[in-house]
Image (cartoon, rainbow, N blue to C red):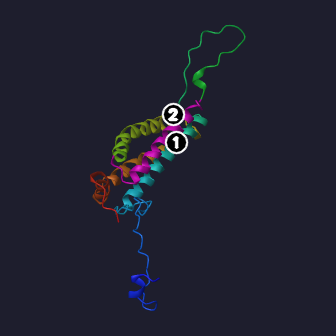
């Protein structure tokens, strides 16, 4: 027994049934790139030079201070302790004669902190530029004190000469680093990172 459909459509002329395509399932966030690329302005050469000048100043200060501590520079930091009067055959060791090698650990912590601030400034962060500018003033005062004590006070020592020369290099590098951060060529680079994010590419 044939159905009316089979009678109306012969076998040779019967249309073939094609399956309809399933609707595309769009999962959110799977088609997005993992990293978004922003059209940041290119890093100015002055910003790169300013970062190198900051790192040079920090390295010279740390090396000079460390050499001064171990080579008994007049500017070396000495830990002071209060000892009671010692009687008898045991001699008293004056704490002022200690060069303070533990101060090198503190110098290293300060150097790492200052050097770490240069990285966000190099990437255009405004707060890092302001922080480095504010720290430049006390840094210059510390370097001037080290130069005066290591070169012009007390007996001349090889540690004092090395510390004084490195302090002079750092003293000259810091003003140059600060001035390069505020040149007109770098203003747009820092301002773009403060105002808003540019549209993604």
> In the rendering, at what x and y percent does residue 100 appear?
58, 29
Mark 2–mark 1 distance (CA, rounded to whole Å): 13 Å
Residue 168 in sight here: no
Residue extending farthest to the front is 1
SS at mark 1? Answer: helix
Q: Is residue 57 placed above or below 107 in the rendered structure?
A: below
Within-10-Å neighbours for mark 1: few <14, some 14–19, many 20+:
many
Q: In which quarter of the image is the C terminus?
A: bottom left
Q: Main secondary structure of the magenta part?
A: helix
* Residue found at x 68% / y 15%: 91
Q: Is residue 177 placed above or below 150 in the rendered structure?
A: below
* Residue found at x 52% / y 38%: 109
Name the image quarter holding residue 78: top right
* Residue found at x 55% / y 43%: 63
Whether residue 4 sits left or right of residue 166 in the image: it is left
Nearest to viewer (mark 2 / mark 1):
1
> In the rendering, at what x and y percent does residue 187 appear?
28, 56
**Counting residues from the N terminus, which is met first, the one under dot 2 or under dot 1?**
1
SS at mark 2? Answer: loop
Q: Which of 2 and 137 is in front in this view?
A: 2
* Residue linked to disc 1: 62
> In the rendering, at what x and y percent does residue 75 appear?
51, 33
Residue 82 in sight here: yes
> In the rendering, at what x and y percent does residue 105 appear?
56, 35
Q: Is residue 39 magenta?
A: no
Within-10-Å neighbours for mark 2: few <14, some 14–19, many 20+:
many
Q: What stretch is highlighted in magenta?
A: 99-126
State if disc 1 and disc 2 touch (CB < 8 Å).
Answer: no
* Residue linked to disc 2: 75
């Amino acid at each position: 027994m044939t159905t009316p459909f089979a009678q109306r459509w012969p076998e040779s002329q019967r249309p073939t049934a094609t399956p309809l395509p399933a609707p595309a399932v769009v999962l959110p966030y799977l088609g997005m790139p993992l990293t978004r690329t922003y059209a940041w302005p290119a890093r100015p050469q002055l910003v790169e030079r300013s970062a190198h000048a900051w790192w040079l100043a920090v390295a010279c200060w740390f090396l000079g201070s460390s050499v001064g501590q171990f080579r008994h520079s007049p500017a070396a930091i000495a830990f002071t302790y209060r000892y009671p009067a010692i009687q008898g055959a045991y001699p008293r060791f004056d704490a002022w004669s200690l060069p303070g090698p533990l101060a090198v650990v503190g110098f290293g912590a300060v150097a790492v902190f200052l050097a770490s601030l240069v990285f966000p400034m190099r990437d255009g962060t405004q707060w890092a530029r302001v922080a480095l500018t504010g720290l430049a003033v006390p840094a210059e005062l510390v370097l001037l004190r080290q130069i005066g004590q290591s070169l012009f006070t007390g007996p001349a020592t090889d540690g004092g000469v090395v510390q004084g020369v490195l302090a002079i290099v750092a003293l000259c590098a810091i003003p140059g680093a600060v001035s390069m951060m505020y040149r007109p060529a770098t203003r747009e680079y820092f301002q773009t990172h403060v105002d808003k994010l540019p549209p993604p590419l």
